[in-house]
Amino acid sequence: MKIGISSCLIGERVRYDGRHKRNDAIIDTLLPVAELIPVCPEMELGMGVPRPPLTLTQNMSGDVRMVTRGDERQDYTHQMEKFAVESCAGSLAGISGYIFKAKSPSCGIGDVPIFNIRGDVVLENSFGLYARGIHRILPNLPITDEMSLTTMANIHQFVERAFVYSIWLDSEIRTDEELREFHQQVRVHAAARNENFVTELDQMADGTMGEDLTARIERYIATLMSGLETLPTDSGHAEALRAEIERNLPPVPT
C-alpha cells in the first residue's frame, strides 16, 4: 500500500529554515509495510529553501488566505488549493493513508491557528490549506500527523486503518455481494472496537435497512473509517477473534 507523508518527516531538508523533522519511529515502522510518497507542497510551488514562513490570515471579507509573513506578503492560496487537487489525481492517486506535519499552515490537521490582519488569533484549530484540500477530495482517507503517532499502539492503529482502506480501494465495490464480501474481510477489525459498531456495519452490509445501494456503500465506508479511529482494546481483539472463529466453524452434525 502507498502512504502519503510530509517530506520533512522522512528527513528531507525542505522546511522554511532548511531543517527537517525526521521521525525514525514512524519511518522504521512503515517502510517494511508501505511505499512512502513524500510531498512538500511549498517546495512543489517553487518556494525554495530557505523561504519566508507561511501563515493563515483572515482578511476583511472573512476569507482565509495563505500568505507569507513579513512586510511584503505573497498570497499562495490559489496555488496551494490547485496543487491539492492535482496531487490527488497525480502522485497521490491510490494512496491508503496520509501522515501530515502537525501545526503546519499547509499540512496541519486541526491544530493550525488563523490570524486576523492585526495578528490576533481568530481560530486555533483549523486545517492547513493543503491538508484541507486533500481531506475534502478524499474524506474517508485515513489521515494523521506525527504528534498523534507517539506510541507504537497509535502507529499500528494507523497502519491498520490504512490497510483496511487499501482493501476497500482494491475491491471497487459496486454490488451488494461485493459489499458483503468486503465486510467479511474487515469485520474482525470493526469487532475489535465495540459490539454496537460492528452490528451497525452488519446491517449496512446486509441491506436490511432498505437504503439505496450507492448511498449505503458511501455510508458504509464513512462509518467504517470513522469507527476505526478508536483504538482497539486487548479484550476487544480477543473477543473479535473468538467470534470470527466461531462464525467460520463448520456446523456441528446432529
Image (tube, rainbow, N blue to C red):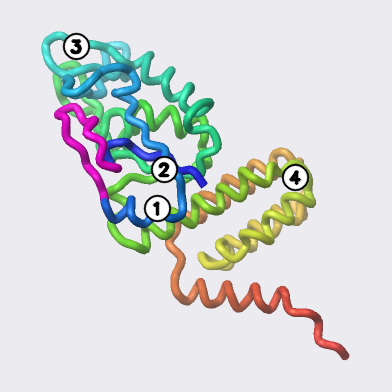
| Highlighted magenta segment, given as a residue range | 10-23
Of the numbered discs 3 and 1, the one sitting upstream in the chain is 1
Of the numbered discs 1 and 4, the one sitting upstream in the chain is 1
Label 4 residue SS: loop
Q: Tell me the kind of residue under disc 4.
A: Glu
Look at mark 1 in the image and give the residue it sits on: 30
Quarter where residue 75 is shown: top left
Relative to 112, does residue 41 appear above or below in the rendering?
above
Of the numbered discs 1 and 2, the one sitting upstream in the chain is 1
Res. 211 mark: 4
Foreground label between 2 and 4: 2
* 51 sits to left or right of 127: left
Label 1 residue SS: helix
Report the Cα–Cα distance between label 2 and label 4. Answer: 38 Å
* 222 sits to left or right of 58: right
Foreground label between 1 and 4: 1
Report the Cα–Cα distance between label 2 and label 3. Answer: 33 Å
* 22 sits to left or right of 180: left
Look at mark 3 in the image and give the residue it sits on: 73
Quick check: is 15 in the magenta stretch? Answer: yes
Foreground label between 3 and 1: 1
Report the Cα–Cα distance between label 1 and label 2. Answer: 8 Å
Look at mark 2 in the image and give the residue it sits on: 36
Report the Cα–Cα distance between label 4 and label 3. Answer: 51 Å
* 38 sits to left or right of 55: right
Of the numbered discs 2 and 4, the one sitting upstream in the chain is 2
Quarter where residue 144 is shown: top left
Q: Main secondary structure of the magenta part?
A: loop
Label 3 residue SS: loop
Q: From this viewpoint, is residue 109 visible?
A: no
Report the Cα–Cα distance between label 3 and label 1. Answer: 38 Å
